[in-house]
Amino acid sequence: AGGQSLAGPPRGWRKHLRHRPMGERGVGFDRNQEATCFVGDLDSQVDESLLWELCVQCGPVVDVHIPKDKLTQQHMGFGFVEFKGQADAEYAIKVLNMIKLFGKPIRLNPASKDTAETADVGANIFVGNLDAEVDEKLLYDTFSAFGNILSCKVATDESGASKGYGFVHYETQEAAQMAVTRVNGMLLNGKKVFVGFFVSRKERSTDENEKAFTNVFIKNLPVEWEDTELNELFAECGTIKSSVVMKAADGKSKGFAFVNYETHEEAAKAVEELNGKEVNGKAIFVGAAQKKRDRERELREKFEALKVERASKFTGINLYVKNLDDEVDDEQLREAFVPFGNITSAKVMVDDKGASRGFGFVCFAVQEEATKAVAEMNGHILGQKPLYVALAQRKDERKNMLEQQHQSRPGGGRMSGGGGGPMYGQMPPQMAMYGQMPPQGPAGARGFMYPQQMM
């Protein structure tokens, strides 16, 4: 349900309405927006002449325009039809909405209204338990009695067959409320339908689900345990409706299980009292059972939190060292930087064969020591090569900085000499910060700037 788009016209559609290129009507004509319809969900085979032939049946048509992509010259799936009068446009919306062109139901809205600005929050409804024969046209005809519909869709699979549910997006919340009240539980094409306000997957509160959970997940169980032992332990916390120890194909326990209690309070008691309990020398984990998407969301949040924590922990103390001699190893790198302070780690990055990749990282205990090392070691000869030393940056930070530099340059960042080779005579921000001149590069390439490593 969360993946269905219920938006009206696509973002930026109004510029096509207001700034129509010069056509037969001359330069800068004013379109009558009140008499203009937005037509969406057009098949790629629909052109302006076909759309004109369809719409002229509802009244005199003044102009038809289907915007095209400038690169591909393919239309973008929507267009505009201007009628002679507003009444004709309103009639076309009533008559032509959801009729099929090349097997796709088209959608008509008044072009004088920006649905992103006028549509009420909470005006989306979900319609479930639809008969397989119910299409967008029937859905539209049924629900249009309660108010102006901005979009209407029946969810389908890859073969075009109905999935048994759909969505209706009204212009006002009052219309949506009336539809929910009047149609929920009624028969549509012989089947009792469910009608309720649409809630996206993102907005569905997982916290509420967790507060009402009755299913408990247990891991780190003794491999010899069967359902009997599981029930004996967890029956102490309440009435068990069902339980199972998960097993492999050979019948051996996988070490985890599920227990479903009669009430949430019993399940919560099991989590509180049995989580961390030692069983046969092992501490078992007991927690609320989660759906796959909830587990993935939780893992993503933990991963992002760890990234932020790690970044903040090493900000200003972790140095990136480039242009290392092939013979320099971890110990030599540490020895080169140890005069500047306490080093917590020094690492030369190597490939899968153990050969140096020419760069590494040195992490100091405090920021002042790292700053001093950058100032003193940038351009320093180690082995046979001059080092490039700078504060290490995360990939997203480096990307943002480069984008800002590119945007701040005249002409979008193009250099007068053209080309996309190395930048000569340019001083990296890190060098400017510490007042250092850039290290010498190859012969004749004074001021060569080594690219920053993206972590």
Image: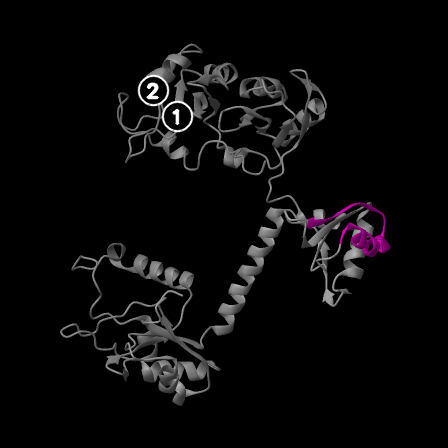
* C-alpha separation, residue under disc 2 versus residue under disc 1: 8 Å
Identify the residue at horizontal 17%, vertical 57% (top origin). Answer: 418
Identify the mark at residue 35; answer none if there is no mark. Answer: none
Q: Residues within 10 Å of mark 1 (few under 14, many from 20)?
A: many
Circle on res. 48? 2
Does residue 185 show up magenta in the picture?
Answer: no
Please state, as top left, top right, bottom left or bottom right, where the N terminus lies in the image.
top right
The magenta stretch is 226-246
- Residue 234 within the segment the image draws in magenta: yes
Which residue is labeled 1 in the image?
A: 79
Q: Secondary structure at mark 2?
A: helix
* Quarter of the rendering containing residue 454: bottom left
Q: x, y percentage for residue 172?
A: 60, 30
Residue 135 locus on image (x, y percent): 55, 20
* Left-right relation of 282 to 61: right
Return the residue nearer the eye: 79 or 63: 79
Q: Is residue 237 visible?
A: yes
Residues marked 2 and 1 touching at CB (< 8 Å):
yes
Q: Label 1's element?
A: strand
